[in-house]
Image (tube, helix red, strand yellow):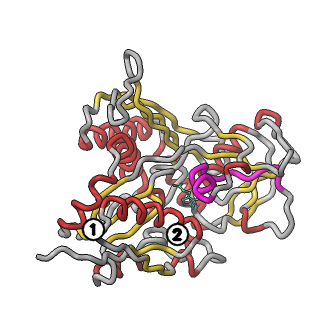
Amino acid sequence: MTSRETIPIGTRKSALAIAQTVQVQSALEKNNPTRSFPLLRMATTGDNNQAQPLSSIGTTAVFTRELETSLEKKECDLLVHSLKDVPTQIKPGFVIGAMMKREEPNDVMVMRPGESKALKDFGKGDVVGTSSVRRASQIRRLCPGVQVMDVLDAADSPYTCLLLAAAGLLRLNFDERITATLPPSVMLHAVGQGSIAIECRADDTEILELIKPLDHLPTRLRCEAERSVMRILEGGCSVPIGVWTEFVYSGAEPTDAESVGQLRMMALVSSLDGTEIAETEAVADVNGSVDLAIDLGRTVANQLLAKGADRILAKVLKDRDTTLVPTGTGEEKTIKGWEV
Ligand SMILES: NCc1[nH]cc(CCC(=O)O)c1CC(=O)O
């Protein structure tokens, strides 16, 4: 087969999606100066139904399905996604050929310019803006009495703060709007948060070779471990699972960026009101092996199940059907989406 000169990249149209895709495009252009990588921009089910609950339009692949159809029809040869949005079970015939070096995976707090308030001082009267059930349940647990409101709900701004992913803000050059970065002792981030995934057809060896240099092993190992936890727990649906992964070293931290020590993972599953929680952690020598990273995820998932995660998840899924969620203030609100 002759090598392709023009390699279209499929992407969503949002500002964040385009910023991420341009990052991939630049890296590919740099490594392959004789080839071109035009962008093919598409709207997805998730983009077309922003006023509707994600749960009512289907919870899986709402941001990836149309892109995969286009990849299948060979209208494009690779897709760029936030790894966080990619279902843990990839459709047969497709693979994540690269997970790019992870941006800061943490969630952050954004307040009005010049304002700041420590989360420990949050309570009754404070309104926290987020559409994520994972962030909402952890913040309710940490700050009893706070009101959590969907970001889409507010006409004017009643919020003390918003909770968002650091990665999205950094990629859109809103660094200065970050009031505080939340460490894992405060909030565990979403599975895969902060990494960009490049998806291609599983049998397209030419593209697999082309994107291989963009795969970052430490990121791959961390994210495969995280996705393994989710795959076991979710049963196909988005649920409030928070994770944290890091490499730990017995001696001094090595200077080699690709070096991987022991992989440590923390994880939790929380009820929507934050009152019930299963949390755990584990460490394993993964020796650069994706299979061993996946095993660590399995161990963590089983520890969570032993601590009652299945009961909490069953309740969360039941609450999702009614879409009414207690806010901790005695009121009930409708969750518009099931972003994690
Ligand atoms: N939920 C939508 C979404 N999907 C990916 C990101 C940010 C980038 C990333 O997590 O890698 C965001 C925004 C956010 O959660 O604040």
For disc 2, the neighbor class at 10 Å (few under 14, some 14 to 19, many from 20) is some
**Compared with residue 26, is residue 8 higher up or lower down, i.e. above or below?**
below
Position of residue 185 measured from the top left corner of the image (x, y, whole percent)? 60, 31
**In 3D space, how far apart are the residues under numbered discs 1 and 2 (Cα atoms)?**
21 Å
What's the residue type where badge 1 is placed?
Phe
**Compared with residue 284, is residue 114 higher up or lower down, i.e. above or below?**
below
**Compared with residue 78, is residue 147 higher up or lower down, i.e. above or below?**
above
Please give the name of the residue rendered at 39% of the width and 37% of the height, measured from the top-left corner: 300
Instruction: Work out whether residue 26 or residue 222 is closer to the camera in this orientation and state it.
Output: 26
Tag 2 residue: 18
Tag 1 residue: 94
Q: Quadrant of residue 27?
A: bottom left
Position of residue 44 measured from the top left corner of the image (x, y, whole percent)? 49, 78
Residue 302 lies in the magenta stretch: no
Q: Which mark identifies residue 193?
A: none
What is the span of residues highlighted in magenta in the rendered image?
A: 159-172
Let me know if residue 236 appears in the view.
no
Let me know if residue 203 appears in the view.
yes
Q: In this rendering, which labeled residue sits more in front, label 1 or label 2?
A: 2
Please give the name of the residue rendered at 80% of the width and 44% of the height, measured from the top-left corner: 145
